[in-house]
Image (cartoon, helix red, strand yellow):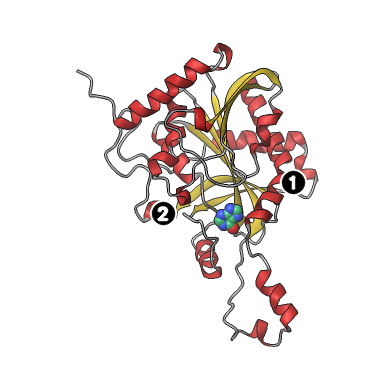
Amino acid sequence: AAPAPSGIYQRASETAEYLRSQVPAELRNPQVAIVCGSGLGGLADTIHAEPVFSTPYSAVPNFPQSTVVGHAGKLVFGLIGPAKLPVMLLVGRAHFYEGHEMELVTFATRVCKLLDIETMIVTNAAGGLNPDYEVGDIVLLNDHLNMPGLMGFNPLRGPNPDDFGVRFPPLSDAYDLELRQRVHKAWGKLGLGQGKRRLHEGVYAFVSGPTYETRAECRMLRTLGADVVGMSTVPEIVVARHSGIRVLAFSLVTNKAVLDASTRGDDAAIQGMSKQELDAYLSKGKANHEEVLEAGREAAKDMQALVKQVLSDLGAA
Ligand code: HPA
């Protein structure tokens, strides 16, 4: 006899079945899921092809309720591009810092698998650690540092749900190379590189938050090889890879993390500063949620155009 399904498989099945019962037939089998991060939910409004089916997370059984400003949670099913590729957008996500367990943070990813989604595109707002990055730049992730994961908060900790994947999944090829090549092509096709915004490839450091990083933490993460830092995405990617979903991930650089030496008052740079100069020095690069949302609004259009182009190309492939 087949082994009994794991608890998480049963709960995710219940949610997938509910969605299948609600969503119109032509939208019921999305091939791609797109997770829209802070300020990046506008993608949902760029789905022109009717019909569109939308439902708030609050109506979806077992779904976590998001508590962050700028993250109103909803699921949107629609068709994108000339080839009418069926997609599902997840506008808003559950974060670990909200107090959710990792299983809940990654629950929607499990549901994606049970909806037979093959590819997941994950977006987020992140702080730039690479001094070469500017606010508004887009970073295609090619690797990550799972800081909470390395310390024990890995979403796959615990009994392995064998119905999703193996006990010890590899992550050395987590960020799909073929999809990344498509992004570079789409970027060229759209001519987005003509403006001042740049496309990079880089390493994302996942931290739990909710505090932004101290200067010393920024230097540590940079020393460890991170290019951007943020409070999401990696748990979803780990769980997606566990069940064989292909992954593409983008960060929008919404602020530059501070790598400057110190604020102790004993370093040469700040010895002779006036009160005004000191205030300016201390506020430089100090991350705040408003700034993150604002940069998101400005750059989001290009990011959305890029994701849409990749989806159109995928639909045509
Ligand atoms: N640190 C962590 N998360 C973030 C940042 C940051 O500087 N900016 C946007 N999300």
**Which of the pair 44/144 is nearer the observer?**
44
Can residue 83 be seen here? no
Indicate the secondary structure of the residue bearing disc 1. Answer: helix
Vertical order, 270 against 5 (above or below): below
The residue located at (54%, 45%) in the rendering is: 142
From the top left corner, tell me how far across and down residue 22 is, in percent.
51, 17
Left/right placement of residue 140 relative to residue 211 reads: right
- Provide residue 145's location: percent of width, then percent of height: 47, 53
Quadrant of picture, ligand 1:
bottom right
Q: Is label 2 within 8 A of ligand 1 (CB to nearest ligand atom)?
A: no
Badge 1: residue crowd in 10 Å (few <14, some 14–19, many ≥20): few
Quadrant of the image for the C terminus? top right
Residue type at mark 1 is Glu
Residue 166 position, x and y percent, is 32, 34
Q: Secondary structure at mark 2?
A: helix
- Residue identifier under label 1: 298
Q: Residue at x 66, y 57 (%)?
A: 255
| CA–CA distance in space, label 1 to label 2 | 30 Å
Q: Is residue 106 above or below residue 226?
A: above
Q: Amino acid at mark 2?
A: Pro
Q: Earlier in the sequence, mark 1 or mark 2?
A: 2
Examine the image and state in which quarter residue 151 appears: bottom left
Seen at 28% across and 43% down, the residue is: 158
Residue marked by disc 2 = 148
Numbered disc total: 2
Q: Residue furthest right?
A: 194
> Would you say residue 255 is visible in this rendering?
yes
Looking at the picture, tell me which residue is in the foreground, 47 or 224. Answer: 47
